[in-house]
Image: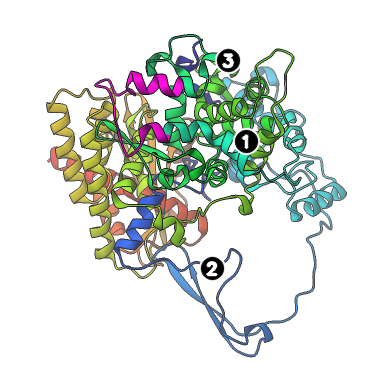
Amino acid sequence: MAAAEGPRQHHAGGPARHPADRDGLGGRTPAPLRPAHPLAPLRVLLRHRCGRRRRQHPRGRCPARPGHEEGRQQAALRVRLRRRWGHLLTVKATEPCEERRVRCIDGRRACPPEDCGGVWGYAEILELLGGPAAELDEEAQDRLEWLGDGFDPEQFDAAEVDRRLEHWEAGGVGHLETPLPTTLLPLIAGSTTLPAGLMDLIQAARLGEETLEQSADLAARLARPWVVLLHEIGSGLKLTGAGYLPPASVKRIFDELDFGAAWLGTGNREDKTLPVAQLRRTAIALSLIRKERGSLRPTATGRKLAGDPDALITDGDPLALLRHIERRLPLDTSQIGEQAALLLLLTTATGARPDNGLDPAADLLTGLGWRTDDDRPVFPLAVSDEADLTYAVLDQLHRAAGGTDDADAHTTPDVVRDIARRALHGDGSMTAPADPGDPAYLADIDPQEAVAVAATSLIAEIKGVRNPLEAELMLSTALAAMDMGAPDDIDEQQLLDTLTFMLGEVIGYAESLGSQEALALLRGASVIGPEASRGAARASAERLAGGGVPDRPWAARVGRPQLLRAWRYGDIFGQQESVGVLFDDRGREHAVMVLIDHVLGGGVKDCWVAEGKLVKRLQKDVGRLRAGTDETFFEDLDAAKAVEVLEAALAQPPCPADAEQVEDLGLHLPLLRARTDHLRELAAGAR
């Protein structure tokens, strides 16, 4: 199996397991866990274009009036549930806090596992556990397999619960002696059970230990591959017609970095010289260079960190460049790619050579629920495929530090081990400014570069998309990322105008690239986003398609799934109602679920998407709800009625009541608006 062409990996239970809503209807499509997003530079420019920046406060601290600490005056704190959804808390008095901790006094029976489907779902599991194993169908066997071996619903140990509570309050996870770094949360999020070896690996990485500072000379040696590439590019380097580095440039990089010691070949063609190709790809992922209109150009960060292309390498700041690389790791952004990259960083943090981390990472990914499409365990080569950017950086650092591939050399130099530890631990003292609200971050970004970074990052994400819904959810998430960057006091029209302008810039840049992936991005942007940007994306897409750029197989179906059915149910008192719309795209069903709260003004309170097995569970629940009760109603809807209900809710301000609903709305409102537009077209066609 070639590393670049290995079988696709999928998660046996979907990318992550998410709880049903309070009525037991459907799970939610998982939200991205990474704090950074490809549109982060655009978020900075959005605030800059609006003429103000979001106020920043140290994490865990809030502004208060003078005298608050003595409790003599009132203090007001505006709690921000994302832009426009806020409320005021008034602190009337403060008292000394007696230090306590949560203790378990008593209890009975085992706690239902997370994501079991609520009360109804747990009752079904208990029924399955109590029945004959021979009578279980495939779905029932899958549910019990997910539950894990050894689950006893009658078991309860108050002392054990108390011990776990104490460990949890101290920030511990599993049997770890130190709190789990937040960078590793993507490895455990959504998992009810973890592979036995994962906690052992985290413990062996010793992330809490102090690492040694690198000298400037050592940092220059480690950062040299990227500095050599940046100096070869200079202020700009024209690519060949096929999009590769010129042969002369490839040869100079190949010789200067002595790639010939580990790579056979003449070293003068990028498509035949993997080390040079990987170096270029990692430099783009590290935001050191960018591709723009057939040329490679350094970013503002690359220029600052590498120094003058016409001067000596030491004229740059190699230590800052190395810190920048540490801060950006891991580089891979797909869910399996990020998990694979984190596992490679963990194995390297134990001192293992990067390629020696492939086998344990593959085993742990399999333990986390990943499988190949033909339901086989994850192969080691698939790890280097899914996490190729992070693996390439670790391999470059290993070689630059003097590491070898000798059969008897199983470890990496200590300096590379420490880099992996700092990348995982998130040591703020060793990182460049990462907060988009930091003036130093804004100083490094020019508008054209921000647009180029955002567009190329989105295109890289859409390259892995396999169906229309994935494309729509990806773009819906991107819009949410931009929305999060808006100032708190911006009005609706100004935000709409600014978003339209910024998306228009991304659309124009994507059209200039003229690639199949750029066309796929434009197809998605033609249905997700403000009306003006959708029109611009549609026009750009038609120009590229008319010029001979081929469409992705799914592109023509973006935003146009087949309507299977729609319904609503709620309480007879008119307080809340849920609307569900079930769609199909060539046998792949998904449902858009909307919760409307009439007590809070009739706006959308929550919105999420159910896919795969969750749709089947949802349909069973709908069948049960059709019977209704004395206090509830159920109604089937046609397209016209569904549009009427959804448009009325979208016309009112959103009204989320908790953090999860705030996140759900931010991620899925653009998709809900697109689906409502699609239903309107279907209703018009039916008349």
Q: Is residue 673 magenta?
A: no
- The magenta stretch is 230-254
The residue depicted at 83 percent of the width and 55 percent of the height is: 106
Foreground: disc 3 or disc 2:
2
Within-10-Å neighbours for mark 2: few <14, some 14–19, many 20+: few
Q: How far is mark 2 from mark 1, CA to CA? A: 47 Å
- In the rendering, at what x and y percent does residue 70 appear? 68, 86
Percent x, y for residue 25? 48, 43
Above or below residue 138? Residue 52 is below
Residue type, mark 1 in image = Glu
Mark 3 residue crowding within 10 angstroms, few (<14) / some (14–19) / many (20+):
few
Q: Position of residue 539 (x, y in %)?
A: 14, 39
Which SS class for mark 1?
Answer: helix
| First-in-chain label (2 vs 1) | 2
Q: Which residue is mark 3?
A: 376
Query: Would residue 57 be found to the left or right of residue 439 on screen?
Result: right
In x, y percent, where is residue 478? 37, 46
Q: Which residue is mark 1?
A: 124
Mark pair 3, 2: CA separation: 48 Å
**Residue at left 55%, top 22%?**
384
Between discs 3 and 2, the one toward the N terminus: 2
Which element carries disc 3, helix, strand or loop? loop
CA distance separating discs 3 and 1: 29 Å
Name the amino acid type tagged 3: Arg
Pointer 2 residue: 57
Given this view, does label 3 or label 1 mark the residue nearer the observer?
3
Density class for disc 1 (Cα within 10 Å; few <14, some 14-19, many ≥20) is some
Name the residue nearer the viewer: 177 or 347.
347
Q: Identity of the amino acid at label 2?
A: His
Could one spot residue 116 in this view of the protein?
no
Point out the residue furthest to the front here. 311
Quadrant for the C terminus, please.
Answer: top left
